[in-house]
């Protein structure tokens, strides 16, 4: 059964830093991997979707990479801002099921 | 505006009183799904549907029912709610293997 792990569970950084969030999964037979953002008390917002045939996706200051062979994905946030403070979740999709990690709670302070 | 709409957003009920949480999407998505989110356990899938009249169990289906009579709607039914179903519930939809869109969530408390 697929297991998705995110490290670290929480991260606090000063504004302006570049940072990397990690996501690992045990079963490499995935269709895609998605990164989401969740603000407190809110729903999840999709940030990036990487298909299994792709290595990375970029959107603005965000870049997500996928290495299926090692079971890893990273979310790179450039020049972090206080508005980036949220919980970031990754999820792998395989055989109709989307399995979520427990998230990394990010705080960016001024 | 493309969106997934859940109702109610907040609900307090008592054990055994049947309730339905509605979910509607306006993006003509084939795939719809329900999740519950609990502290320390993350998001867990309850049921999902690949298309009209096709539903399947997720990881935690016990105590829940769903139906998919129309493409846009995917209600979650709790026939006899219990306190362990107190949680934050999310509905989501997507094209098959596409980007997943989430509703704002429904916070349910069962006393």
Image: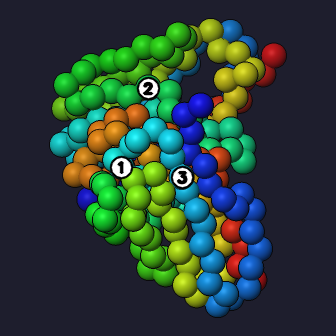
User: Which of the chains bears the disc numbered 1?
Assistant: B
Residue tagged 1: B31
Say whether residue B100 is left or right of residue B95.
Answer: right
Q: Where's the N terminus of chain B, which quadrant? A: top right
User: Which of the chains bears the disc numbered 2?
Assistant: A
Residue tagged 3: B24
> Which of the 4 quarters of the picture holds residue B99?
top left
Mark 2 vs 3: CB contact within 8 A: no
**Mark 1 vs mark 2, CA separation in Å:** 18 Å
Q: Nearer the viewer, residue B43 or A106?
A: B43
Mark 3 vs 1: CB contact within 8 A: no
Residue tagged 2: A48
Among all residues in the image, which is located at the extreme bottom?
Answer: B16
The residue that appears at 50% across and 42% down in the rendered structure is B26
Coordinates of residue A78 in the picture (x, y in percent) = 56, 11
For the residues beneath circles 3 and 1, the answer to whether they share a chain is: yes
Say whether residue B47 is left or right of residue A46.
Answer: left
**Mark 2 vs mark 3, CA separation in Å:** 23 Å
Q: Where's the C terminus of chain B, which quadrant? A: bottom right
The residue that appears at 42% across and 69% down in the rendered structure is B67
For the residues beneath circles 1 and 2, the answer to whether they share a chain is: no
Judged by depth in the image, the label closer to the viewer, 1 or 2, is 1
User: Which of the chains bears the disc numbered 3?
Assistant: B
Q: Is residue A55 above or below residue A46?
A: above
Q: Secondary structure beneath disc 2?
A: strand
């Amino acid at each position: 059964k697929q297991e998705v792990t995110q490290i670290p569970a929480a991260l606090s950084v000063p504004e302006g830093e570049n940072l990397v969030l990690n996501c690992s999964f045990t079963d490499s037979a995935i269709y895609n991997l998605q990164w989401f953002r969740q603000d407190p008390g809110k729903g999840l917002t999709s940030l990036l979707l990487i298909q299994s045939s792709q290595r990375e996706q970029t959107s603005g200051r965000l870049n997500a990479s996928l290495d299926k062979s090692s079971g890893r994905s990273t979310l790179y946030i450039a020049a972090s801002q206080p508005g980036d403070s949220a919980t970031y979740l990754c999820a792998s999709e395989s055989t109709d099921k989307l399995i979520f990690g427990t998230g990394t709670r990010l705080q960016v302070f001024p | 505006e493309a969106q997934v709409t859940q109702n109610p957003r907040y609900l307090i009920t008592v054990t055994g009183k049947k309730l339905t949480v509605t979910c509607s999407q306006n993006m003509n998505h084939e795939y719809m799904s329900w999740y519950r989110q609990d502290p320390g356990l993350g998001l867990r899938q309850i049921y999902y549907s690949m298309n009209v009249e096709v539903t399947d169990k997720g990881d935690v289906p016990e105590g829940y029912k769903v139906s998919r009579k129309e493409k846009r709607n995917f209600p979650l039914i709790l026939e006899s709610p219990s306190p362990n179903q107190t949680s934050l519930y999310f509905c989501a939809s997507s094209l098959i293997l596409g980007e997943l869109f989430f509703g704002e969530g429904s916070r349910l408390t069962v006393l």
